[in-house]
């Protein structure tokens, strides 16, 4: 299991130090939640902040757009060359076009499903993406409680991927901790996003290692 600490829960007064600390503690990716105040009722980090995060990070960036007008945001952040850019299929009419736009920048495309969004919407795009991000809370705020139905959704996506895109990665974001990490692994998850669980733990290394089930 790989772990992607979400800097949404970091201390922004010492963000560079926080990023360096979780990288030293064993993070595989740094998860960056970009919110626009429209798709979700919150606003977070602009590209200058993520540039500073990239400079401090010793691991690849994993950018998660919770925004409308997705192509605009891709153009704003593409120079940072993250490993992944994830976008919500609920926010985009032309999903294939956006997937290709991300891939054309040498970035791995990923689509996101909200808790109530069914896996069936992946039917005609699952071969075209490198990752699916399953939201196990409703997006917009950190520190929420895990929604158990995400486990069934992950299993359904993994079954679909084994037939049509075996290398597909499944990432899970929301309420992840050491109590549900094993169940997430068994359901088919590959990467766990953890914000509050890591950054509020007091021991980043111990928290990250507890997710490597």
Image (cartoon, grey):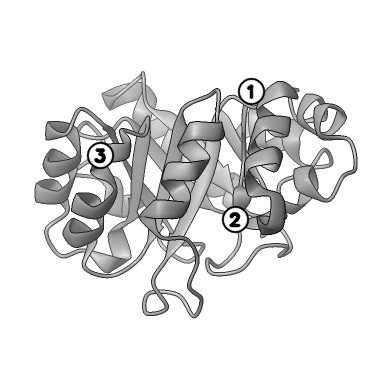
Instruction: Please provide percent x and percent y for residue 153.
Output: 51, 48
Residue depth check, mark 3 versus mark 2: number of the one nearer the observer = 3
Question: Closest to the observer: 138 or 103?
Answer: 103
Say whether disc 2 or disc 1 marks the residue closer to the N-terminus: 1
Q: Is there any visible trace of residue 102 in the rendered image?
A: yes
Q: In what element is the residue under mark 3? A: helix
Q: Which residue does the image show at 64% across and 48% down from the upper left?
A: 15
Say whether disc 3 or disc 1 marks the residue closer to the N-terminus: 1
Q: Is residue 99 left or right of residue 135?
A: left
Residue depth check, mark 3 versus mark 1: number of the one nearer the observer = 3
Q: Which residue does the image show at 47% across and 66% down from the upper left?
A: 116
Mark sitting on residue 136: 2
Q: Is there any visible trace of residue 154 in the rendered image?
A: no
Q: Is residue 210 left or right of residue 60?
A: right
In the rendered image, which quarter is residue 46 located in? bottom left
**Residue at numbered disc 3:** 79
In the image, residue 70 sits, relative to residue 14, either above or below, namely: below
Q: Could you give the CA–CA distance between mark 2 and mark 1, rounded to whole angstroms? A: 17 Å
In the rendered image, which quarter is residue 144 located in? bottom right
Q: Are marks 2 and 1 in contact (CB under 8 Å)?
A: no
Q: Could you give the CA–CA distance between mark 3 and mark 2, rounded to whole angstroms? A: 29 Å
Question: Closest to the observer: 143 or 105?
Answer: 105
Q: Is residue 102 left or right of residue 63?
A: left
Total labels: the figure holds 3
In the image, residue 171 sits, relative to residue 134, either above or below, namely: above
**Residue at numbered disc 1:** 1
Q: Quadrant of the N terminus?
A: top right
In the rendered image, which quarter is residue 30 located in? top right
Instruction: Please provide percent x and percent y for residue 135.
Output: 53, 55
Q: Quadrant of the C terminus?
A: top right
How many residues crowd mark 3 within 10 Å: few (<14), some (14–19), many (20+)? few
């Amino acid at each position: 299991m790989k772990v992607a600490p979400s800097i949404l829960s970091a201390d922004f007064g010492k963000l560079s130090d926080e990023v360096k600390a979780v990288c030293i503690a064993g993070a595989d990716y740094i998860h960056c939640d970009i919110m626009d105040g429209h798709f979700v009722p919150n606003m977070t980090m602009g590209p200058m902040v993520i540039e500073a995060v990239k400079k401090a990070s010793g691991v690849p960036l994993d950018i998660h757009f919770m925004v409308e007008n997705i192509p605009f945001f891709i153009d704003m952040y593409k120079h940072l060359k993250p490993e992944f850019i994830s976008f919500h299929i609920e926010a985009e009419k032309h999903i294939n076009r956006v997937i290709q736009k991300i891939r054309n920048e040498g970035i791995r495309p990923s689509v996101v499903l909200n808790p109530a969004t069914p896996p069936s919407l992946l039917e005609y795009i699952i071969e075209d993406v490198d990752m699916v991000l399953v939201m196990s809370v409703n997006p917009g705020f950190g520190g929420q409680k895990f929604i158990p139905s995400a486990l069934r959704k992950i299993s359904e996506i993994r079954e679909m991927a084994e037939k049509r895109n075996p290398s597909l990665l499944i990432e899970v974001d929301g309420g992840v901790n050491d109590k549900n990490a094993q169940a997430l692994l068994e359901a088919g998850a590959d990467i766990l996003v953890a914000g509050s669980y890591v950054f509020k733990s007091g021991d980043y290394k111990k928290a990250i290692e507890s997710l490597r089930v």
